[in-house]
Image: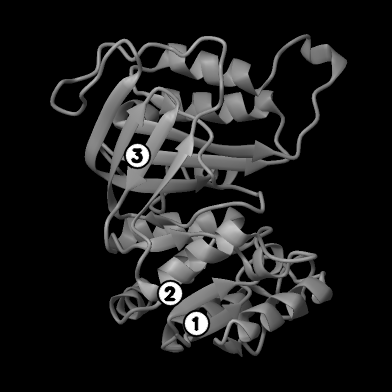
Amino acid sequence: MKKHIYIYSPSGAVRDKAAFKRGLERLQALGHEVEVDAAALASHQRFAGDDATRLNAIHRAADSGADVALISRGGYGLTRLLPGIDYAKVTRAIEKGTAFVGLSDFTAFQCAVLAQTGAVTWAGPALCEGFGASPAPDEIMEACFDDLLQGQGEGSGWRQTLEKRQKDIKNIAASAYKSSSEGIFGVENAVLWGGNLTVLTGLLGTPYFPNIEGGMLFLEDVAEHPYRIERMLTQLVYAGVLGRQKAILLGQFTGYSLVGHDRGFKFQTVVDHLREQLQTPVVTNVPFGHVPTKVLLPVGAKADLAVDGRDVMLVWGHV
């Protein structure tokens, strides 16, 4: 079924023009009407145009009437724009059926929209890294995107990372979970939210950080050493954010290199330490992040979670 997809650039400048072109051609080959924002390829310093240009692009995306407003790429720049966004305009667009989709720096927009309005956006691919991938887009990502377009995507399943010792789930409020020492538990009717860890942590203490109690927070990052990941997670622990959630869902943390000085300190070390700090269950290996194979996740929607050992099912129903 043909859909209207609007491409715009609210963050970093598009340097990989070949990926941009491949992405457009792929979406068109799938039969969609692709509209490109007038400033999609603008460039100012590291940004896709100055702040006013990128802010106007967001508002044009909201006015487009498109089925999907898809960012060209992430990078950096959206946090500069948050006070100037017309959130009422964005909310009206969402209510009329526009799905705002993106990842990475787009987390700033998604958190701000959730904090300011409660409206649902979608964590998913960007044009260049997703549909512009060479030699071809990832099939699972593409299928999940198509599910969104057709209104059929209602959940995702995966297997947690194999660990030498799966931490027992203990001391969990019976009102929120069904649990056992075998790591079987569930979460019901919790707000799913999150995105890029660095971007999200940078919003802490601002009006654009969602005040979510009893939610499920999913996190991912790229090119951040595990000790930096742990530092940001610890900040969220000390701020009380993680302890107020029903579950923490760790996605893909990629693009870093360990060094000799680490002496065995690795990402699993961070996971183990986090679990020691929290009563909240920590689930691993969510298929989302700066990786080709990723699902689409509704930021701000109510969802259910079922975990049986390594097997995980996340269900949000029709959004």
For disc 2, the marked residue is: 149
Q: Is residue 89 left or right of residue 131?
A: left
For disc 1, the marked residue is: 61
In the image, what residue occupies the spot 41% across and 88% down? 65
In the image, what residue occupies the spot 59% across and 81% down? 30
Spot occupied by residue 240 in the image (x, y as percentages of width and height):
36, 27
User: Which one is earlier in the sequence, the residue at label 1 or at label 3?
Assistant: 1
Tell me how far mark 1 sits from mark 3, CA to CA.
28 Å
Residue type indicated by callout 3: Met
Q: Give the structural element (helix, strand or loop) at label 1.
A: helix
Q: Give the structural element (helix, strand or loop) at label 2.
A: helix
In the image, what residue occupies the spot 33% across and 15% down? 169
Spot occupied by residue 187 in the image (x, y as percentages of width and height):
25, 34
From the image, state whether disc 1 or disc 3 is nearer to you.
3
For disc 3, the marked residue is: 216
Image quarter where the C terminus lies is: bottom left
Residue 79 visible, this orientation? no
Residue type indicated by callout 1: Ala
Q: Give the structural element (helix, strand or loop) at label 3.
A: strand
User: Which one is earlier in the sequence, the residue at label 3 or at label 2?
Assistant: 2
User: Which one is earlier in the sequence, the residue at label 2 or at label 1?
Assistant: 1
